[in-house]
Each structure stands twice: as C-alpha cells, then as structure tokens.
Amino acid sequence: MTCSTNERINPSLSSNFSEGVSTKFYTAGANALICIMPDLIKKIRSLEKVSRQLEPGDEARKSVLKKVLDYSDDFLRDLETAKVFEKKDDSGKELSETPVTEEGKDIDTLLGLISRNVDHNGVNPASGGYLGYIPGGGLYFSATGDYLADVSNRFAGMYFASPGAVRMENVLIRWMSDMLGFPKEAAGNLTSGGSIANLIAVTTARDNFGIKGRDLDRCVIYHTAQYHHCIDKSIRIAGLKECIKRNIPMDDSFRMIPGELDKQIQIDLKNGLRPWLVIASAGTTDVGAVDPLDKIGSIARKYEMWFHVDAAYGGFFMLTAKGKKVLKGIELADSVVLDPHKGLFLPYGTGAVIVRDGAKLQNTFSFQANYMKYATEENEYSPAEMSPELTKHFRGMRMWLPLMLHGVKAFRAALEEKLLLTRYFHEKIREAGFETILEPELSVATYRFIPSNGDANDFNSRLLEEVKKDGRVFISATTLEGRVVLRMACLSFRTHVEHIDLLLLVLKEKVEKLLADPAFK
Ligand SMILES: *Cc1c(COP(=O)(O)O)cnc(C)c1O
C-alpha cells in the first residue's frame, strides 16, 4: 500500500504518534497505519466537535439553568392556586407525538412540553391540597441535593469508590435505626421506594432461615388482609409464592388481633407446619391502622420467627411523641421498611429498609466478582452488598441535605401538625353530618356521607368524582367490608389548616349538589 504525499501524516503528529502505539501494532502495519492516521485523526476531531455539545459551556449552562429555575419558581408560586387534579382532553398526547430526533431542541420548547403535558395533567402531588393515597410533597432542598449528586456523579455503591457518599448514606441509616430504637448492629439500605425495601426485607428473612424450595408448602407467613399489596409481590418475587399465607383476624379498627395470631401459630405447629414470618403494618395505607407491634413482636420472639414491620407510611411519626406511643414495639422488629418519600416529604424515589442484624442483610446481598475483588472494605457496609443494586443513584444526598439544612425540628413539627390537622378534620367532618369510620390513629381519616335516600356507596363514589372534577383538592377512596369510604390522608409538609378548610368546603358544596340529584331526593 502506498500513500500519496498529501495523505502522509505531518511530521509532528507522526512523532507523537509513534510513542503512543504498541510496537507490535506499529511494526505489523507501519506503512498502512501512517496512511490511515491523518484520516483517523480528522474523523475523531470532527466527531469531537459534535460530541462536545454534551458538555455545555459556562454560558449555556447558566442560561438553561436560569430558565429551569424560573420555571420551577413559577411552578412553586402557582401551587396555592393551581388545580390538584387536571384532566386534559388529549391526556398529554403531544409528548407521544414529539419523537426523539437527531437534532436537539431549545429549552423553551422543552419546558413548554413539560408544562402542558406533564405538570398540568393528572394529579399534582406537590400541592398542599393533595390529600389522596399517601402524600409527601417533595422538598425543594432534595431537588437541590439531587442536583449536587448528579453533577459530581459520585459512585455511591461501593465504599472504596466514594467513602464519603457511602458514609453519608450510612449516617442516614444510623439515624433512622436510632429513631426505631434498634441496636448498633443494625444496618440497612436506601432504596428507590417502599416496595423494593419490602422485597429486600422479605428476601433477608427467607435466607435467615435458609428456606428452600422443598420446604415452601410447610412454611407459613402471617399478616392481616390490610397488608400492602407490594409485600405480596415481594413474596412472589422472592420465590415464596407456595408458602401458606394466613390472614389473621382484625379488631374493629383493622388492627391484627395478637391472640388470634398466637392461636393460629399453635394450630400450625401442631399440624407440623413451620411458622417463620410475621408481617405487621405500622400504618396501613388504607386506613392508617397500626397493628399492636409490641404484642405481635413478643409472639414472634416466642416462636423464633422473623418479625417484619412495614412502616412505609407511618414510620417517621416516630419523630413525634404521639407516634412513639402508637408505634411502641417497633424496636422488636427484625426488619422495618420506611419511606422517606412519604413521611420525610422527599420527592418520589427514596425508601429505606433497616435490618436489626445488619450482617443478615449483608449475607443475602453480598457478592463476589473478579472485577470487584479489590474493592471491598471491612469497616463500612457498602450499599452494593446490602441490596440488589450495584450502580445506583446517590440518593443519600437528597435526604441528607434537607435534613441538615432544616434540622430535625422542622420535620418533627410538620409531622405533629399533620396529626393534629387530621384530628381537626375528623371533628369538622363529623360536625358536617358525615359518618366517620375510625378514630384516626395517625394521619388518615375515613368518612362517608349517608344520604337519607338512595344508595350510600353510589353517593360516595359520585362524591369522589365530583371532588376530582372540581380539582381544588384531591382525595381518594377505598372499600371497607363492602362500604365505599372516603379517605383524607394528610402527610404533605405543604398541607396546612387552609387546605383542610378548603376540603371541608368542597365536600359541603358537592354534597349539596348531589342531594339535589333525583337519585338521592
Ligand atoms: C406506600 C406503601 C408501600 C409501597 O411503597 P412505595 O414507596 O410506593 O413502593 C408499602 N407499604 C405501605 C404501608 C405503604 O404505605
């Protein structure tokens, strides 16, 4: 192969190049390589020109960020007046019709798309008037924390890679563990949410007893009918679907009856079965009921079973005096699930699992890989050996920053305020002629309106639809023993007394409207 003179590499490039290339390659194809080089460099340089667009300069960064900040400020400013539920006729179809293309678009166009199709479409959980399902809100300083974590992109999976990021997450786990009253051997993991946290707990419990496939149809799991459906998913994913599951009877307040649990365990033992896991709820999603954790915990201890507490909704009420009383016995648990994106008001994407004996959690999720051989450290648990994840979002930062900036006091006050707002709502809604279903234990109120004529379930379903259509506040509903029941769940840091008053007003207006309907006259 010969090269024409003008294709030949220039002398300075050529000498740089000969240093950087292995001799073997160089001698094998010296002639050919010298011919290719100018083209190769030219090509690389021309690609670089385009690929460098991925690294915006000072000005481009500042200009996009300023627009994003303005947009977010407007969003927050409008929260007080914006609808909590908006139904778009096209349900945001514009997004489906805007494909990802070769050429980029400008930030104004994209913010417009986001505003029209995402931020003003469906429910708005950022609003203080969002009182459905389980709210949280979304702390601003979590977004700031995410920004910091994402810009520096520390690898929070392994201690050796980022001792600081791992320590930060472990500090948070220690803080939650102390809040629960767990011993110093406890450890845990920050997850993407409560569902994955429950999966981690169930899997750890399984491995603790070395439960094998052949044992499954003898192994018994105990819970109430009110346990969260994600635990049922966890049980299936963990390969435990064939276990026997017992729905333990509940009292009138939808709490597990400990005596019934004990009785059922004894019957099962007598029949040669193997009771191994008790699942209690520290605040059911449906009605906010807290199972008697202390009594259930003692029973689990007595029979040497694993005691798991799903505190995804209620756990952070441990920061309040009332919560501590209601959740008494949580310290007996072998594992607890918490959801900082509920009770600590973080934006969606952060749950937590805490295991009483951290070594058991590590036993389930530790791993060996050739490419990680030199990457383990003895003195701190690494998130990667405490969960199914390896590379993960550095989610500690979004929890640490707001906690450190505000201090715990602000969170405690907000949680106490939610408990009292729920009490307030409970009294007021009764005054307004509604039937209340349960005394709220934490911050979920259950109620329904009984019209003197017509079907009550129909009335309350329609009442829910009317409130949704109105959009000034948002609530949800459930079915309890065949009755359609409305729920008011108060857990957003943005919810204050005026939101509760607005809900009361909207409910009153809608009841009047429905009572004028021939179906209920
Ligand atoms: C929300 C919730 C879950 C599920 O958690 P996600 O964060 O939604 O995955 C589990 N259990 C209870 C009691 C909950 O309230």
Image: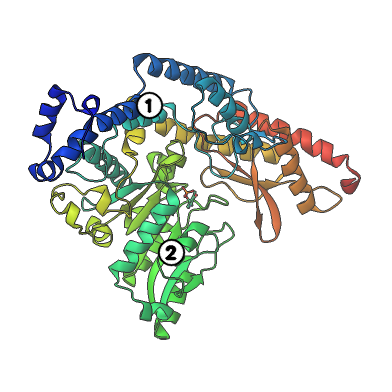
* Residue 408 is at least partly visible in this image: no
Discs 1/2, front: 1
Q: Is residue 394 placed above or below 233 in the rendered structure?
A: above
Residue 218 is situated, as x and y percent measured from the top left of the image, at 41, 80
What amino acid is at disc 1?
Answer: Val
Q: How many marks?
A: 2
Front in this rendered view, residue 426 or 482: 482
- Looking at the image, which residue is at 35% across and 35% down? 399
Residue 510 is situated, as x and y percent measured from the top left of the image, at 78, 36
- In the picture of the structure, the residue carrying the numbered disc 1 is 50
- Looking at the image, which residue is at 16% across and 49% down? 375
Q: Is residue 425 placed above or below 212 in the rendered structure?
A: above
- Looking at the image, which residue is at 34% across and 76% down? 212
Could you tell me how far apart the alpha carbons at marks 1 and 2 are, in whole angstroms?
44 Å
Residue 131 is situated, as x and y percent measured from the top left of the image, at 59, 38
Viewed as shown, does residue 35 lie left or right of 429?
A: left
The residue carrying pointer 1 sits among few (fewer than 14), some (14 to 19) or many (20 or more) residues within 10 Å by Cα, namely few
Circle nearer the N terminus (1, 2) = 1
Name the mark on residue 237.
2
Q: Are marks 1 and 2 in contact (CB under 8 Å)?
A: no
What amino acid is at disc 2?
Answer: Ile
Viewed as shown, does residue 177 lie left or right of 68?
A: left
Residue 54 is situated, as x and y percent measured from the top left of the image, at 37, 27
